[in-house]
Amino acid sequence: MNRIFGIFSLAAMMAGAVASVPAWADEPQSVGDLPMHVGDDGGGQFVGDEGSGQFVGDLGNQFVGDLPDLAPRLARLPESAPVPGLSEHSWEEATAESHSESAVQWHAGSGCDAAGCHEAGCRGGCGRQASRIAGTLDRCQTRWAELDFLLWFPRERRSPVLAGSAPQGTVQPFTTEFGDGIDSGLAPGIRLDAGHYFADGQFGFGGRFWTLFEAEEDFQTPTGGPPAGLTPPGARNYVVPFQNIAPAPFDTAFGLQISRDPTTPGPGSLQGNLDIDTDLRVLGSELYGKLLIGKGSQFRLEMLGGYSYFNIRDRLALNARVVPGAGNPGLGTETSFSDYFDAENNFHGAQIGVQSKVRQGRWSFTSTNKVHFGNVAQTVAIDGSSQTGPFNGAPVLVDADRGLFAKDTTFSRDTFTFAPEVNFKLAYQMRQHVHFTVGYSLVYWDSVALAGEQISPVVDARRIGNLALADQEPEYVFQDSAFFVQGIDLGVTVEY
């Protein structure tokens, strides 16, 4: 009888133990002031949230739930908090699991992708993982580096017509061979841009440098070999046209004749050569800051401000030589002219603008609009010389301090200018941190001194035959105009 009673008693205790599991789960056991429940059932730890039915632990089956409220509060539990029924080793494991789960939940909830805080989409979201002070100390930092190959086209530069040609037997009308508009064509270049974000992407600091390789445009008359590479009489006659202010009977000249075919009307044939060389160089450098003014899950808007420097240098050199041929009184003499114009612009100023970026999947589009404004120091150096004497290396008889157009002078001035800039860039993400980009850029300056525009085509034709002759040619007048460069950018961007 006692044995039967004992068996029934043991069965009743086991039934009561089984029935007590859900009752225990509903009892308000708590740790500290958090309404969370920690228990131990056969070595398996589990954490329940009253009314939610979400568990983390091993209770016959493993359950991992989404605990957007529980995980952050567990992360703030002191590691030494005494928990009834939970050993010290078990408490450490539960704490580690809660921290790991908390990090995953925050990344998913703040718009960060699998790469974590180092992606641009994470800016402004990672600070919620740490204190405000930790975010200010750049707990979540982002850097960028951009390399672009520039395929840009400078604006056509202006100058007087400096070379023309006419068919055999004529001198006029001539066809323009060089001048009027100097088109340098494609000017390749390179641009580097790098920087660093601080305070969880709230502001950034960067620098940019770009340069266009020298854009050249040249002209040379054809040469037929000896003597001394002179242009021989042939199918075309070459001339450097100018505006003649000499009185009659010298007012019929319309230019410096480089070569003239014997069949062309005139005192005799001429042989000579003409070389014109130009080169243009443009570079810029910037130090700037970015300030976040708006963001969303797929866009970012920033204000830009900083320091800008530009250098625009344009040079033009003209070298002409004339040697009278047979039947000319001046046989055996030559006259040469050398003209050199060098215009340089150094801009120092500030910049202000905005940059917006929109993302959609692997694609992103960036628009940068800003204006540079400040002082530009413009310097124009003009050097000219001319010589007349026996042909081919004999001592010079006459040496003048000016060329055909150029009088020795240097002109400098400072003026205020502004330079708007726009850039559009479409990027495709090939790898986690690497984007390939294609874009369009335009930079415009409202006041630039260029070499060809400093040339005055007014010449007293009498001076060609007598270099020492005093003339009434007007003095140099400084010229400036607007200038711009534009073109396609091909590059790669790295964000990390």
Image: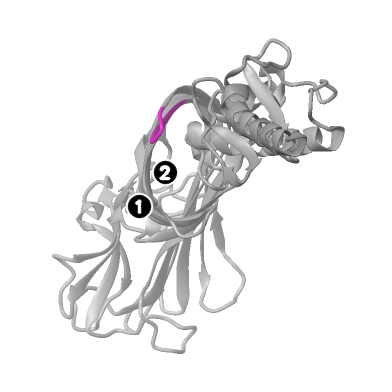
Counting from the top left corner in percent of width and height, residue 31 is at 72, 17
In the orientation shown, which residue stands out farthest toward the top?
33
Question: Does residue 188 appear anywhere in the picture?
Answer: yes
Q: Which residues are magenta?
A: 296-302
Q: Can you tell which quarter of the image residue 420 is in?
A: top left
- In front: label 2 or label 1: 1
Q: Residue at x 79, y 23 (%)?
A: 83
Quadrant housing the N terminus: top right
Q: Is residue 464 above or below residue 473?
A: below
Residue 109, given in percent of the width and then of the height, sits at 49, 32
Q: Depth check: give the residue in front, 119 or 413.
A: 119
Q: Amino acid at mark 2?
A: Leu
- What label sits on residue 450 in the rendered view? 2
Q: Position of residue 244 (x, y in %)?
A: 26, 49
* Label number found at residue 271: none
Kind of residue at disc 1: Gly
Mark 2–mark 1 Cα distance, whole angstroms, equals 20 Å
Helix, strand, or loop for circle 1? Answer: strand
Number of callouts: 2
Mark 1: few, some, or many residues within 10 Å (few <14, many ≥20)? Answer: some
* SS assignment at label 2: loop
- In depth, the one of 233 and 249 nearer the eye is 233
- The answer to the question of whether label 2 and label 1 lie on touching residues, with beta carbons closer than 8 A, is no
Q: Is residue 87 above or below residue 150?
A: above
Question: On the picture, is 16 further left or further right than 472?
Answer: right
Which one is nearer the viewer's eye here, 385 or 422? 422
User: Tag on residue 487?
Assistant: 1
Which residue ends up furthest to the front in the rendered image?
1
Q: Is residue 337 above or below residue 76?
A: below
Pinpoint residue 379: horizontal percent, then vertical percent.
53, 36
Residue 27 inside the magenta-drawn segment: no
Going from N to C along the chain, the mark reached first, 2 or 1, is 2
